[in-house]
Image (cartoon, rainbow, N blue to C red):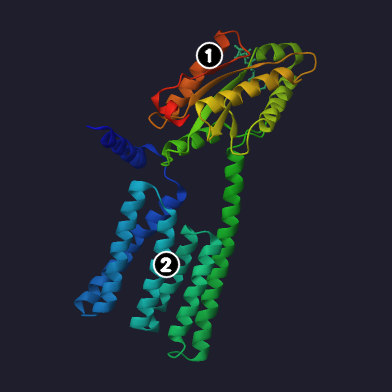
């Protein structure tokens, strides 16, 4: 098996079983899967009755939904697919009303609500508003004003309720997500956030987006707790996090990995650049006063987040280098030796 084959197979494994699927992916696939048995019987019925155009629309929808399920299942990419499904569905629904008449207007309601499940609320509202205008143009000549007005008002209300619900739920999810991934003491990302970021980088397909991983550990932190108390130890952790924020770029991400251990994902940093960053941090901590009357230092291990390896490998390598820095006398930085992959990027 050549290298490309093996990379392809591992990507397939990663996508299909190794990664937890996002909520949006699951909802999109579920929506498509549910729509197939809902539409297919009508398509078959219309086919048997010789309503070729309507049957063709139904069958096209069924085929498109099947293709989307396979695509999202294999690649995990759902954003463009969500937009495509919504536009395709809306167009199919409008074509059905145009071809079969107002009796099929009931399909408009579930179709428009579905848009709020897979798209941002404002985008769903915009697409549905355009759909409603086209629907009015189709029905205006066929219906009495009062009937058309009823349809417009009910569709408008359905969209209003769905928009408010989707907007509120989205905000709550965002707040929950932020809270779940934040370390309550220092305000930096927690271990869960670190693992998600590492997994995202492993899935990142653009090879030019390199990154390095720094693991930092306070030296002899137990002594600080023992001599000054746990509250003073906490204060040191908070001040260290602040210092790290000041000495990193906005694109770098800081996490609390364990008790007195932190991690930094240095975005766009080769090993050499990450080594400079680590050395700067080490020197800044040594020069700062994190606790009055008690000099504090840190040790750092620096690994390259090489696409040939996994997040667990990056963490293990950075941890090994951190251990080497501790063994080497603490207050020092150990950087991974440059491999062929790293050297190319440097
Ligand atoms: N104040 C405070 N201390 C913590 C927290 N989490 C872990 N610790 C303490 O961190 C200390 C870690 O001690 P060790 O693992 O022995 O490491 P160390 O003393 O820093 O020694 P080296 O890492 O070998 O330099 C323990 O005393 C923990 O109780 C925390 O949230 N707050």
> In x, y percent, where is residue 19?
40, 39
Secondary element under disc 1, as helix, strand or loop, is helix
Give the position of the N terminus as an image quadrant: top left
Give x and y (percent) for residue 96: 35, 77
Q: Is residue 259 visible?
A: no
- Ligand 1: quadrant of the figure: top right
Please say if the residues under marks 2 and 1 sit with CB atoms less than 8 Å apart.
no
Which residue is identified by label 2? 87
Vertical arrangement, residue 65 with respect to residue 177, above or below: below
Q: Quadrant of residue 187?
A: top right
Q: CA distance from mark 2 to mark 1?
A: 55 Å
Instruction: Provide residue 176's location: percent of width, then percent of height.
Output: 59, 45
Q: Residues within 10 Å of mark 1 (few under 14, many from 20)?
A: some
Residue 123, visible in the rendered structure:
yes
Out of 82 and 17, give the one closest to the viewer: 82
Count of marks placed on residues? 2
Any atom of ligand 1 within 8 Å of the CB at mark 2? no
Asked if 219 appears above or below 15 in the picture, the reply is above
Label disc, if present, on residue 323 of the rendered structure: 1
Name the foreground residue: 55 vs 203: 203
Residue at 60% across, 42% down: 178
Give the side of residue 295 with respect to residue 161, left or right: right
Q: Kindly tell me whether mark 1's CB lies below 8 Å from ligand 1.
A: no
Q: Who is closer to the viewer here, 231 or 295?
A: 295
Looking at the image, residue 82 sits to the left or right of residue 173; the answer is left
Residue depicted at 52% across the width and 89% down the height: 146
Rendered image quadrant of residue 41: bottom left
Q: Which mark is residue 301?
A: none
């Amino acid at each position: 098996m050549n290298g490309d084959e093996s990379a392809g197979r591992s990507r397939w494994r990663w996508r299909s079983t190794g990664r937890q699927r996002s909520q949006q992916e699951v909802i999109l696939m579920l929506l498509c899967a549910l729509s197939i048995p809902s539409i297919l019987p009508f398509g078959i019925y219309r086919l048997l009755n010789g309503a070729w155009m309507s049957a063709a629309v139904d069958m096209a929808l069924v085929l498109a939904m099947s293709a989307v399920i396979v695509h999202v299942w294999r690649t995990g990419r759902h954003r463009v697919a969500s937009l495509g499904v919504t536009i395709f569905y809306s167009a199919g629904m409008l074509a059905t009303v145009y071809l079969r008449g107002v009796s099929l207007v009931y399909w408009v309601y579930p179709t428009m609500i579905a848009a709020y499940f897979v798209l941002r609320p404002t985008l769903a509202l915009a697409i549905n508003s355009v759909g409603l205008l086209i629907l009015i143009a189709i029905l205006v000549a066929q219906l009495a004003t009062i009937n058309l007005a009823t349809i417009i008002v009910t569709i408008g209300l359905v969209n209003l309720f769905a928009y408010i619900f989707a907007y509120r739920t989205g905000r709550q999810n965002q707040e929950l997500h932020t809270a779940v991934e934040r370390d309550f003491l220092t305000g930096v990302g927690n271990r869960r956030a670190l693992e998600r970021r590492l997994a995202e980088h492993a899935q990142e397909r653009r090879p030019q987006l390199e990154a390095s991983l720094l693991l930092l550990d306070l030296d002899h932190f137990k002594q600080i707790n023992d001599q000054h108390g746990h509250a003073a130890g906490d204060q040191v952790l908070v001040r260290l996090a602040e210092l790290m924020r000041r000495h990193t770029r906005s694109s770098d991400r800081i996490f609390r990995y364990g008790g007195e251990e932190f991690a930094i994902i240095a975005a766009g940093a080769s090993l050499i650049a990450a080594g400079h960053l680590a050395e700067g941090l080490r020197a800044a901590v040594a020069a700062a006063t994190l606790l009055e009357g008690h000099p504090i230092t840190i040790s750092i291990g620096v690994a390259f987040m090489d696409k040939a390896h996994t997040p667990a490998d990056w963490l293990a390598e950075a941890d090994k280098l951190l251990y080497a820095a501790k063994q080497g006398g603490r207050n020092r930085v150990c950087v991974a030796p440059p491999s062929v992959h790293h050297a190319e990027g440097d």
